[in-house]
Image (cartoon, grey):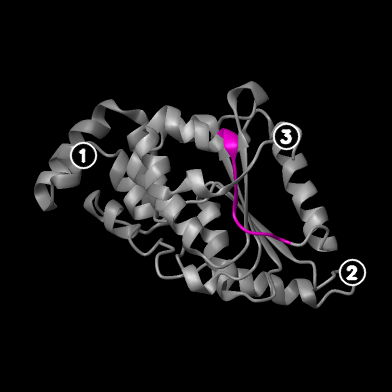
């Protein structure tokens, strides 16, 4: 694990373009879950990536991680954090699993390091480095479970970047509303490859940010109309086609 993910991606692209069976003008990169952030970060520094798909887009993993911890842990530091974390981990197998995995993947040695290790995993400041077309996928259950602050952070970033941004939303009726469309990958793949087909043929050429109307309605339903108003999404161009069909 490393935050500067353009480094390993560059090595992969170097190999890809050395092959005779690779079209160097049609390279796309997709990232799932945490990979949504890593893919966007790599695309900001690797100009040979023609298109990037973030499923889902995460802007700051440190903020997202801190947001899901109990307030007592977020405010704790040093020994206090260690004690509180130990109590929670004793009775919560999920927390224990996440921490033990982080010991290996992030190289941390104590629970308090868990929050600090994620701080470099952020896209803030890269808004003007993203120039290639982006596709961002959102699922209804993720929207429902994500905090309002994280929703605002994500949408503010996506509306601030200069690259063409397309969005797809998967409601519960699609069967693809869970994390990264697990359980309904066929719907996600249809959307992804339809978008790539149009993009690589430049038919149609990427246009301005277009927000699915169903995504706007989901943001209102789970986080209130103030989110939509603050983000000015009611002024953005909306798509009305069904996301289930991959449109």
- 220 drawn magenta: no
Specify the label residue 21 is tagged with: 2
Which residues make up the magenta segment?
206-214
Front residue of 208/37: it is: 208
Q: Given the current orientation, which residue lies at the most extreme front position? A: 235
In-front residue for pair 229/34: 229
In front: label 3 or label 2: 3
Estimate how packed mark 3 is, as few (under 14), some (14 to 19) or many (20 or more) residues with alpha carbons within 10 Å. Answer: some
- Judging by the rendered image, the residue that carries numbered circle 3 is 187
Q: What's the residue at 45%, 58% (across, down)?
A: 157
Task: Residue 45 in the image: state x and y as whole percent.
Answer: 56, 75
Name, please, the residue furthest toward the right: 21
Q: Which of marks 1 and 3 is nearer the N terminus?
A: 1
Sequence order check: which comes first, mark 3 or mark 2? Answer: 2
Indicate whether 23 appears above or below 79.
Answer: below
Of badges 1 and 3, nearer the viewer stands 3
List the residue tagged with mark 1: 85
- Residue 126, position in %: x, y? 46, 70
Residue at image coords 32%, 51%:
63
- SS assignment at label 1: helix
Question: In the structure shown, which secondary structural element does the residue marked by tag 2 occupy?
Answer: loop
Instruction: Give coordinates of residue 91: x percent, y percent.
Output: 26, 26
**Dot 1: within a 10 Å radius of its alpha carbon, few (fewer than 14), some, or many (20 or more) residues?**
many
Q: Which mark is residue 35?
A: none
Residue at x 24%, y 52% (from the top left corner): 110
């Amino acid at each position: 694990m490393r935050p500067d993910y353009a480094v390993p991606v560059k090595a992969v692209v170097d190999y890809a373009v050395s092959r005779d069976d690779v079209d160097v003008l049609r390279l796309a990169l997709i990232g799932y879950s945490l990979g949504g952030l890593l893919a966007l970060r790599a695309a900001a520094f690797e100009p040979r990536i023609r298109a990037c798909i973030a499923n889902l887009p995460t802007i700051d993993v440190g903020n997202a991680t801190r947001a899901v911890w109990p307030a007592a842990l977020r405010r704790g530091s040093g020994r206090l954090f260690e004690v509180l974390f130990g109590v929670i981990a004793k009775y919560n197998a999920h927390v224990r699993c996440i921490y033990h995995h982080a010991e290996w993947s992030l190289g941390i040695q104590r629970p308090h390091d868990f929050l600090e290790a994620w701080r470099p995993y952020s896209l803030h400041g890269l808004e003007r480095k993203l120039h290639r077309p982006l596709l961002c996928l959102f699922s209804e259950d993720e929207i429902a479970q994500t905090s309002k602050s994280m929703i605002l952070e994500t949408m503010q970033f996506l509306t601030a970047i200069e690259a063409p941004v397309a969005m797809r939303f998967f409601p519960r009726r699609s069967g693809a509303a869970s994390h990264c469309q697990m359980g309904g990958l066929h719907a996600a793949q249809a959307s992804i490859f339809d978008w790539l087909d149009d993009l690589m043929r430049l038919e149609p050429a990427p246009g301005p940010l277009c927000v699915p109307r169903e995504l706007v309605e989901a943001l209102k339903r789970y986080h209130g109309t103030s989110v939509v108003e603050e983000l000015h999404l009611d002024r953005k161009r909306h798509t009305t086609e069904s996301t289930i069909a991959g449109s």
